[in-house]
Amino acid sequence: MNTIIYWALSALAILIAAYILPGITVAGIIPALVLAIVLAIINTFIRPVLIALTLPLSVVTLGLFALVLNTILIMLAAAVVPGVSVAGFWWALLFGIVLALVSAVLKKIQD
């Protein structure tokens, strides 16, 4: 049950972040739900491997490369999910930051 609630909150956070940022378009609730699943899969399987491979670069940049990596993964997820488009790298970076903030607020409200 917690997984379904987390999935719904993630989709809601995606819709709110897309509403705030004009460079991100989400066609509706279904693409937002699919994007939430795709981002969860990417963050579970691909992101840890990429973080381990780019650890020296993250150390040199004091962790800022993790933001770049997150941005690239958001762009990958948007490319895979129909109905979701990202205008460019900077919009994806802002989307990742806004998505993290909105998700944190929604989780605080849920708890």
Image: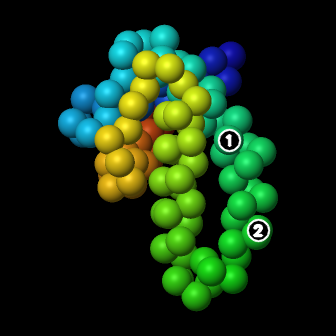
In the displayed structure, does residue 36 sit left or right of residue 47?
left
In the depicted structure, whether residue 17 falls above or below residue 88: above
Q: Residues within 10 Å of mark 1 (few under 14, many from 20)?
A: some
* Label 1: element kind: helix
Residue type, label 1: Ile
Which residue position is annotated with label 2? 52
Q: Position of residue 85 (x, y in %)?
A: 39, 31
* Label 2: element kind: helix
Q: Residue at x 32, y 28 (%)?
A: 25
Q: Residue at x 54, y 25 (%)?
A: 81
Where on the picture, by quarter, is residue 95?
top left
In the displayed structure, does residue 90 sit left or right of residue 3?
left
Which residue position is annotated with label 1? 42
Quadrant of image for the N terminus: top right
Residue type, label 2: Ala
Q: Position of residue 48 (x, y in %)?
A: 74, 57
Q: Position of residue 108 (x, y in %)?
A: 44, 39
